[in-house]
Amino acid sequence: QVQLVESGGGLVQPGGSLRLSCAASGFTFSSAVMSWYRQAPGKERESVARSSSTGENINYQYSVKGRFTISRDNAKNTVYLQMNSLKPEDTAVYYCKATTWMGDYWGQGTQVTVSS
C-alpha cells in the first residue's frame, strides 16, 4: 500500500523558513519522480518543485526559485522542501506527489500559513 505522509507545516511570519518532509512507503522510492504541489484557497493546485529519481534533475516554479529547495534522501525514502524567505502568497496546503510506473500518488497535505 502506497503511503505519503507530509509533515513540517505550520504558521510562520513573512521572511521566515519552514522545512517540509514527505515520508514514503509502499513503492520503490529511488525510482520515483517526487514533486511538491500546493493549493491555496480558491485556486487550482499548482506544481512547486520536482525532483528526478536521482535528484540530478530539479525544476521549480518561477515564483519560488531561489527561495525553495527540493531534496531527497533515497536511503530514508523521504523528500524535503526547504522554504526560505516565505511570503504571504506562499500560504497553501502543500502536497507531495510520487510519480511511479504504477501511477501517481498523493499525500494528505500539510498546511503552511505565512502571516504576521
Image (cartoon, rainbow, N blue to C red):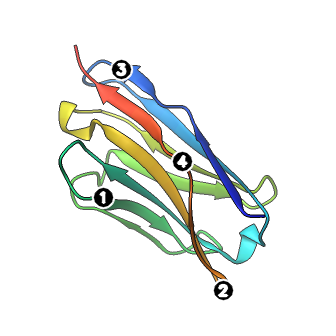
Q: Position of residue 77 (x, y in %)?
A: 75, 57
Which picture quadrant has residue 52?
bottom right
Tell me the quadrant of the picture where the C terminus can be found: top left
As measured in the structure, the alpha-carbon distance from the residue carrying label 4 to the one carrying label 3 is 21 Å
Crowding at label 3, few (<14), some or many (≥20) Cα neighbours within 10 Å? Answer: some
Q: Quadrant of residue 85?
A: top left
Judge left or right: residue 66 versus residue 3: left
Q: CA distance from mark 2 to mark 4?
A: 21 Å
| Residue receiving disc 2 | 101
Q: Residue flagged by tag 2: what amino acid is it? A: Trp
**Residue at the image position 34 percent from the left and 24 percent from the top:** 16
Q: Position of residue 45 (x, y in %)?
A: 30, 58
The answer to which quarter of the image holds residue 61 is bottom left
Dot 2 or dot 3: first in sequence order is 3
Q: Secondary structure at mark 2?
A: loop
Q: Which residue is mark 1?
A: 45
For the point 24% across and 23% down, the residue is 14
Which numbered disc flags the more N-terminal residue, 4 or 3? 3
- Graded by Cα atoms within 10 Å as few (under 14), some (14 to 19) or many (20 or more), the crowding at tag 1 reads some
Q: CA distance from mark 2 to mark 3?
A: 37 Å
Q: Is residue 17 above or below residue 64?
A: above
Query: What number of labels is visible?
Result: 4
Q: Are marks 4 and 3 in contact (CB under 8 Å)?
A: no
Q: In what element is the residue under mark 1? A: loop
Which residue in the protein does label 3 denote?
Answer: 12
Secondary-structure class at tag 4: loop
The mark nearer the N terminus, 1 or 2, is: 1
- On the image, the x and y values in percent for residue 97 come to 53, 63
Name the residue carrying label 4: 108
